Amino acid sequence: MKVHIVTVGDEILIGQIVDTNSAWMAQQLNAIGAKVTGITTVEDTSESITAGLHQALEGVDAVLMTGGLGPTKDDITKKTIADFFGVGMYFDESSYNRLQRLFEKFGITPNDSHRDQCFMPTNANLLTNKMGTAPGMWFNHDEKVIVSMPGVPYEMKYLMEYEVLPKLQAKFPMMPIQHRTIMTVGAGESMIAERIAAVEEGLPKHIKLAFLPNLGQVRLRLTGRSSDEASLREELDHWVKEIEALIPELIYGYDEYKLQAAVGELLKERGLSVSTAESCTGGYLAHLITSISGSSAYFNGSIVAYANEVKTKQLGVSTQTLEEYGAVSEQTVQEMVQGLLSLLGTDIGIAISGIAGPTGGTPDKPVGTIWLAVGNQDSIHTKKLQLTKDREKNIQYTAVVGLNMIRRFVIKSYQAAESI
Amino acid sequence: MKVHIVTVGDEILIGQIVDTNSAWMAQQLNAIGAKVTGITTVEDTSESITAGLHQALEGVDAVLMTGGLGPTKDDITKKTIADFFGVGMYFDESSYNRLQRLFEKFGITPNDSHRDQCFMPTNANLLTNKMGTAPGMWFNHDEKVIVSMPGVPYEMKYLMEYEVLPKLQAKFPMMPIQHRTIMTVGAGESMIAERIAAVEEGLPKHIKLAFLPNLGQVRLRLTGRSSDEASLREELDHWVKEIEALIPELIYGYDEYKLQAAVGELLKERGLSVSTAESCTGGYLAHLITSISGSSAYFNGSIVAYANEVKTKQLGVSTQTLEEYGAVSEQTVQEMVQGLLSLLGTDIGIAISGIAGPTGGTPDKPVGTIWLAVGNQDSIHTKKLQLTKDREKNIQYTAVVGLNMIRRFVIKSYQAAESI
C-alpha cells in the first residue's frame, strides 16, 4: 500500500512549527508495511488543499490529511473536501450530542463555532476522536481512501492508532514486514556499531539494521520483509539474540519500551523504593520516573534543591562542603544522597548537581559540568559528565544517565528475587 | 515571490528524521517577503524527483530543493535534473580542484565517488559551498528558478544565507510580509474566538488571523502583507491593541515567548521567589520553571511529595486531613502550600495533587481530578480541574494551569514595581 501524507497549515509554511506529525505518521505506516511515497504541506486555502489532494492521489492507495479541522474560522478543510467530492454538508446530531455531553461536564454551553464544527460532508465516515472535539473523517473514493484528521498531535495520534491504521490494514493487503527494536543505553552509536559489526555484516539481504540514536540512548531496529511470516519471526529472533550476546549490559528493553518504565519494573520486581535530589535537572528526573503509571509503588518523592539553602537545610549538605568544593562537586552530590536517604527513607537515592547552562560556568567548571551520585545506606557511586552548552539537551541527557545509574546500581547491588 | 520547497530523502518518508530544513528555509524566505506555498518530500528515485519538480513548479516563481547531493550512490538528483532540462553533464574542473585542495589538508586522495560528484548539468550555475564538498546549483528555467542544495543542514543554511537568498532578492521584487503572535493562556480556542469576534470580522483582507492551540494555551497569529512596510507595522500594532483590549487577562506575551519565561520575568521584576509542592505532576512544574536559564533568581526548589508520608512528614499535611478529605482534595493542597512556605521560605508556593491516570480513580474522584493551590502567607487560592484519562496530557496541562495560577496570583496580590 502506498500513502501520501498531506499537511494543511500555514504555520508550517512560514516555518513557525516543524512538521513532526508527518514523521510520526510515516513511522507508524512503515511499521504496518505501508510505504509513504510523498509528504506535502499545503496552504490553508481551498485552492491549495484541492490542488494538493489531486496531486497526492496520483499513484497512491491512500491520502492521509492532517490539520485544518477545528472550531475557528480559519478551518476550511471540511468544506473543501465536500466540494472536492461534489457533495453537500449535513449537521451531524451525534457529534453535537457528544460535544454537549463533553461540555456539560465543564459547565459550558456550546457556542455557534462549536455548532459549525458539527457540519460534515455527507459522504464522510466519522472516526470518533476521544482526545478532542473534531472527529476524523474517512472517505472511500473509487478504490482509494482519503482520511482527514485534526492536526493537534495527540488527537491525530489517537485517531491513527485506534481508527486509521486498523482500517487501512483491513482494507489493503500488505507485504508482511516485521520489526524488532532493541533499546540500549550507556554507549554511543559508533561504539555499538563497532561491538556488533560481526552481526551487521552477517545479516541477510531482506533484514536491515538501523541505528536510531537519541540523547544517550540508541535504538537498534531490525526490519525484515518476507511473505513467510513464521520463518521471518524466527530469523529476527535469532538476530536479536546475536546482538544481545555482544552488548548485554547496554540493553534494557525492546520495542520502544521506555527506560523509566524498565527502571520502574526493576525496582518493583525487587521491592525497592527510590527518591531523587535534583539541582540542575530541576525535577526532570522525578518527572520521567512519575510519567509511568503506577510509579507510586516505588517512587516516594523528590527534593528539588535549586537554592543552596535547600541543599543545606533540607538535605543536610554541610556548608563547609559547599564552600570547599562548591555545589557542583562529587562531595556535594554524595552528601545530597545521604541526606535524601535519611529524609525520605527510600532504599535508593540519586542526586544531581551541575551547570545546565548556557551561562554560569567557570574555568574550573565550565558549562555542562554535572555530577551525579546514586547509592543506598551501604555504598554510593558517583559520575561526572562534561556536556554541551545547550540547557535543554543537558537536562534531558543527564536524566537519562541518572536513570541508567539507578538501573546499573540495582542490578549490581541487589539480587533478582528469583535468584535469591 | 512564491516558492515551493522540495525535499529529497527516503529517511524523511520512513519517519527516521523530521524535516527541520524546510521549516528553517520557510522562516528565512518568509522574512525576506517570499511566500512558501508548498513543501513536498519526495522519494530518492528519478521518477519521484521528476514528478515532484513538475508539480512544484506549478504556480510558483522558484523551487528550492534540498537533499540528494553527496558522495554516496543513492544520490541521483543531479542526473535527474539534467534529464529534466534535457541537457547533458560535464566534468567541472574547478569543483574537482577545490575538492583536491580540501582533501590535501587532511592528507586524503579523492576517490572515484568524489570524482563522480564533480559532474554537473551543463546549464547549472554553481554556488560555492564553503561548508562541504557538494556545490549548490542554480538553474534559470523560463522566468522561473530552480535551486538544488545538499540536505546537510549547515551546508544548506550556508548556501541559503550567502548565495540563494541574496540572488532571489535580486531577481524577484518582494511583497513585504509581517507577523505578530499573541500568546494567551487560560481560555480555549472557541472561547477566545467568541470574545474577539468583532476584531476578526473587522480585519482588512490583507491581514489574516490564525488560532494555534496547544494544551491550555492558544497563540493568535496576525499575518499582514503590504508593500508599505511602515503602515503595515502600524496597522498590525493597531489590531494587536484591539485584541489586547478584548482579552487583556489572557495575554502573557508575544512572539513565541514561553509561559514559564513570562512567569519568571514577573517574579524577577517584583523580587519574588516561588517553590512548588507536587504530587501528581511529579516535578514537571519545577522542570518547566527551571527550563528557563536564570530561574535560580526566583525559584528555590520543590518538594515532590508522591508518597503520603512525604506530604505529612516534609510538608506537614495533617494525617487527619488526608484521612478525612483524601490526598486529592482542596484541604490537602492548601496544607501543602502552607507547609511548603514554612519549609522553603519562599514568598509564593504552589501545590498540586491529583489523579493523573490512566488508573486510580474512584466514583467520587474520577481519573483526571486535580486540585491546585497557590498562595503566600496571607491568602491561598485553589482550583479544581476535571481532565482526561491521558496521563501525559493531564500532567502537561496541569503544569500550564499551575504556571498561569502563579501569574494571576502575582498580578493580583503584588503591585508592579513601577506602580508602587
Image: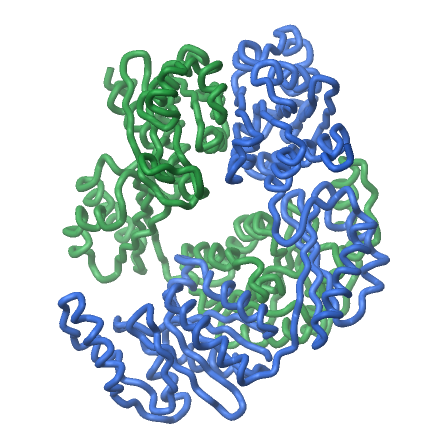
Chain colours: A green, B blue
The location of residue A156, given as percent across then percent down, is: 58, 52
Front residue of this view, candidates A278 and A24? A278
Which image quadrant is residue A207 in?
bottom left
Looking at this view, name the residue that lies furthest to the top.
Answer: B320
Q: Is residue A39 above or below residue A339?
A: below
Q: Is residue B156 left or right of residue B204?
A: left
The location of residue B179, given as percent across then percent down, is: 66, 63
Q: Is residue B72 above or below residue A27?
A: below
Q: Is residue A306 visible?
A: yes
The location of residue A120, given as percent across then percent down, is: 74, 61
Residue occupying the point 43% across, 82% down: B50
Residue occupying the point 79% across, 45% down: B248
Which image quadrant is residue B181 in?
bottom right
Classify the position of the C terminus of chain A by image quarter.
top left
Classify the position of the N terminus of chain A by image quarter.
bottom left
Front residue of this view, candidates B337 and A213? B337
Q: Is residue A294 above or below residue A79?
A: above
Q: Is residue B249 above or below residue B137?
A: above
Residue occupying the point 57% across, 10% down: B312
Q: Tell how many labels.
A: 0
Q: Is residue A336 left or right of residue B295?
A: left
The location of residue B26, given as percent across then percent down, is: 54, 67
Q: Is residue B113 visible?
A: no
Residue occupying the point 64% across, 30% down: B271
Q: Is residue A60 left or right of residue B236?
A: left
